[in-house]
């Protein structure tokens, strides 16, 4: 997938996605913390969580 | 009022949610606060209000942030927001951001290279990235509130203030 904006480098991360490290650092850190909290909640079982994630990815055309 | 059953008593829907899931609420507040920290408050307030209109989020439309007014947002602009494509009250920079915001909310896959290039021309690549991230945060926040029926939630000023005094927020900064 080609990024729509010019990124500081052409590096890709471990998932093969454009590396956005260093961009919007406060939002990235806060999002990461929210993900951590969400995973720790464990109030939704992993199967349902994964089904929702995959369905949403397909709906959004996120094929990676 | 939220339809979630069995929540403890609190003054607001947000307070009720915080009572059962304080860390998640604090982390969500921190994400919203970070979005405002990294963007022009006028552009973000215009985006926030436009998202609220598109989603039919009347509770969010009723809230305003002092950050944006302090940065130059006028009541006339807010009143004229639905007419942003043609109203002379909006700059090319604001129009570029509103155009991308609308398309993002309606169908993110439909955001065009031209829309991104227009925003990048005014904000730079890093600024465009931060703006898109922030729009994503605002949209997610509003959709979550609508889905859960959360009407009495803090405004931007209160969320930023809460995040500044919260352990979860301090942990990520």
Image: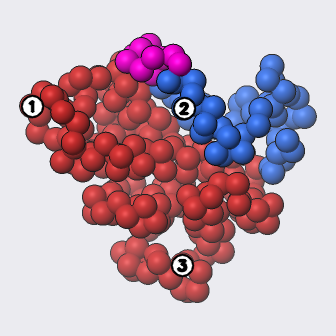
Q: Residue at x 43, y 39 (%)?
A: B33
What residue range appears in magenta? A37-47
Read off the residue under disc 3.
B84
Q: Chain of mark 3?
A: B
Q: Is residue A44 magenta?
A: yes
Residue B91 in view (yes/no): yes
Residue B5: quarter of image: top left
Secondary element at tag 2: helix
Q: Are marks 2 and 3 in contact (CB under 8 Å)?
A: no
Disc 1 crowd, CA 10 A, few/some/many (<14, 14-19, 20+): few
Question: Which is closer to the viewer, label 1 or label 2?
Answer: 2
Q: Chain of mark 2?
A: A
Q: Chain of mark 1?
A: B
Q: Colour of chain B?
A: red
Q: Colour of chain A?
A: blue
Q: Nearer the viewer, residue B35 or A17?
A: A17
Read off the residue under disc 1.
B9
Label disc, if present, on residue B49 of the rendered structure: none
In the rendering, at what x and y percent does residue B69 appear? 38, 63
Secondary element at tag 3: loop
């Amino acid at each position: 997938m080609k990024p729509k904006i010019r990124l500081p480098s052409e590096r890709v991360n471990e998932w093969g996605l454009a590396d956005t490290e260093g961009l919007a650092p406060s939002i990235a850190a806060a999002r990461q913390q929210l993900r951590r909290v969400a995973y720790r909640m464990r109030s939704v079982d992993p199967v349902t969580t994964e089904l929702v994630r995959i369905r949403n990815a397909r709906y959004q055309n996120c094929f990676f | 009022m939220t339809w979630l059953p069995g929540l403890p008593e609190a003054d607001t829907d947000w307070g009720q949610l915080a009572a059962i899931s304080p860390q998640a609420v604090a982390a969500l507040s921190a994400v919203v606060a970070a979005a405002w920290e990294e963007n022009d408050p006028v552009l973000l307030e215009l985006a926030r209000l436009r998202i609220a209109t598109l989603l039919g989020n009347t509770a969010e439309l009723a809230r305003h942030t002092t950050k944006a007014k302090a940065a130059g947002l006028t009541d006339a602009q807010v009143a004229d927001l639905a007419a942003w494509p043609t109203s002379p009250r909006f700059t090319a920079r604001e129009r570029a951001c509103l155009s991308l915001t609308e398309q993002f909310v309606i169908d993110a896959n439909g955001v065009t290279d031209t829309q991104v290039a227009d925003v990048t021309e005014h904000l730079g690549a890093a600024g465009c990235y931060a703006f898109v991230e922030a729009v994503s945060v605002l949209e997610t926040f509003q959709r979550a509130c609508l889905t859960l029926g959360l009407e009495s939630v803090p405004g931007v000023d209160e969320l930023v203030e809460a995040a500044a005094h919260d352990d979860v927020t301090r942990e990520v900064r």
